[in-house]
Structures are given as structure tokens and as C-alpha cells.
Amino acid sequence: MFYLGKLMERWKPACLLLLQLAFMHQTMAQGVEKIVTLDSVTIEAAKRGFNVSDFIDLVKSDTSFLKAFRNLHRCSYTVSADAQVFDKKKRLSGTLQKISKQVISGNIRWMKTIAAEENGKIRYRKGRYYFYTIEMLNDIFFPADTLPVAKPYVPSEEEGRNRTNNKNREKLKTLIFNPGTEVKGVPLIGGRMAIFDEEMFPHYDYSIRTDLYRDSISCYVFSCKAKKLSNERTDEKAVTRNLESWFDRSTFQIVARDYTLQYESIFFDLNVTMKIQLMQNINELVPAGIEYNGEWNIPFKKPEIVTFKLLFSNYESCSKTKEN
């Protein structure tokens, strides 16, 4: 997944602005609500007032994930990582375990390492991480620098900020927070990820069902799956092979998102699955956990196969301090 940051750098001058705007409310083609399949419980709910069109609009425009992850820049919390890297034959070649606590003092924050252990082929001799995925994992969630505390998320202000931010981790936010939107500047696959684009409707099956999330939270689940062409073939034009967003039925608050991206070509291959869970911390939405399982194969580079789990805990109230 993280190789997209590298690929985007080649096309970033003309496309960076459009890419960052992908995090905000977008004007998307209308009509998906006309082809979405409903389960029996959702049909009954619609008869009692549940509005399918409004729910689809909620799915399209939801910025909860961006807000929740931005809250990591405002809260004290503990995060643990458990990562494994594999060789091209899918044999375990290295592991990384790490536990850190974010400390906030006044207007600044930093990560304090509680425990860390690395084994096998994780780094080059000069210390840089051997796998780009691990490098980005460390850069995003275990930064070495002292950083400013973020102010509360405001969409219009966030949009202006992202226009001038050209770091790879900012570019990757589209995949994490809005995996069903078009990724401008990524050749071959960018437009195929826009699941709400009318041109992509024939390649997907859309549905809304009711289900229990982890046997405890009654949810409406929006699902978008690549069409099955046969028992063994899935529509290859659908890069987003599976996307599910779980919304609490009582509050319409998003609680989780699962998705799988797949693409094969002579230029590069990817097969990435992510599961992201959110939770409520007092009055703030924050990440609870991330599971990642990804394979990358790019010409002139060794295949990258990495899995990791992140768990977030021990949150304290988020700072109200504004950035300088």
C-alpha cells in the first residue's frame, strides 16, 4: 500500500491539489442509491423512515476517519505495533514489536518508547528500514521528532492545510480515510477506485444490510463488492475489490471500515487488505485498531510482503490547544 506514495511523487506537481481535495466533501455522480440492494431489516427500516439516499450521501461524504486519526495529534495515548515481513517465497524474514506513549506538554507532543524489539531483516546496515511499509508505519505512528499539537479538526481549514503539504503520509490519507474515492495522480488505477463514479457502477455490487459489529453494536453496513464474472473471476476493472463501512444504527456514527484493494499489471501488482476500528474517547472519535495485510510487487524492486497490527489504548482527553 505504501508504495503509492512513491508512485505519486512522479506526478505530484499537477495532481497534488486534486489529491488533497479528495479528503473533503466531493461532488459525486448521483444514482448509486437506485441500484443498491437492501436486506429485509433495512427494507422495513425504510418503511419506517430510514432514507436510503441520505444514508448513501452520508457514506460518500463521511470524514470521520480523517477526524479520528487527526485526533491522534491532540491526545495522550499508548500504541502498540506488531509487524512481520516476508521474503518473496512468503517465508518470515523479520519482525518488529513496539510500544510507545504519546506525551503532550503544552503545545507540543512526542512519542516516548516503552518497549521495542526488532528481529531478522528489518533494516539496511545504515539503519534505514528495508521495507517501505515499515518505514511509513514508523514515520506515521512512531515519529521521532517533537511535533506541534493539532487543533480540533475543521474541514475547511484542513483542506487549506493539505494543499501545501507534500509529504507521502499526507498523500496516503486518501487510501486510509476514503478508499472508495479516485486517487488523482496514480496512473492506471486512480480512477478505477472511484466506486461512486457512474462509470464504475457496472463493475460493482452495492448493498446495505444490518449486522452486529463484533457481536455488540447493531449497525447498518454499506458494502461495495467487485462483480463476480464467474466462480473464479472477479471484474478486474474494480481495484477496490471489497469495501464495508459500519455505522451504528442508533447514532449513525461510523465504527469500522474494512477494505481490499487488488490490481495486477506489467507495471506493478498490489493486494492489500485493511481493517480499521474506531471508538469514542469521552466526546472524541479516535482509532482503536488497524490490521494491515499487504503484498506489493514493483519492477526493479524486491516484492514487499508485510502484515501488521496496531492497537491504541489509554487515551486521555484530547488537547484543546491550538497550533502555533
Image: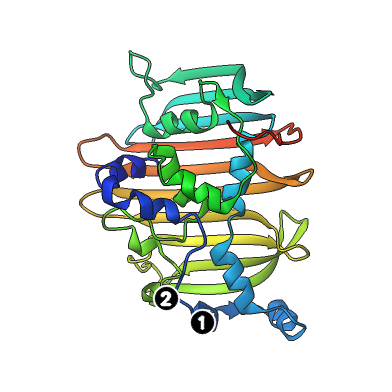
Query: Residue flagged by tag 2: what amino acid is it?
Result: Phe
Residue 206 x %, y % = 52, 73
Q: Are marks 1 and 2 in contact (CB under 8 Å)?
A: yes
What is the CA distance from the residue labelled 1 to the residue labelled 2? 9 Å
Mark 1 secondary-structure assignment: loop
Query: Residue flagged by tag 1: what amino acid is it?
Result: Ile
Residue 196 x %, y % = 46, 70
Q: How many marks?
A: 2
* Quadrant where the N terminus is found in the figure: top left
Among the 4 quarters of the image, the one containing residue 45: bottom right
| Residue topped by disc 2 | 201
Mark 1 residue crowding within 10 angstroms, few (<14) / some (14–19) / many (20+): few
Residue 156 x %, y % = 54, 53
Residue 41 shown left or right of residue 31 in the figure: right
Q: Find the residue positioned furthest to the front.
A: 324
Q: Is residue 273 visible?
A: no
Name which residue lies at 51% across and 31% down. Answer: 83
Residue nearer the viewer, 233 or 312: 312
**Above or below 317: residue 183:** below
| Residue topped by disc 1 | 35
Residue nearer the viewer, 279 or 154: 154
* Quadrant where the C terminus is found in the figure: top right
Residue 146 x %, y % = 55, 21
Name which residue lies at 51% across and 82% down. Answer: 35
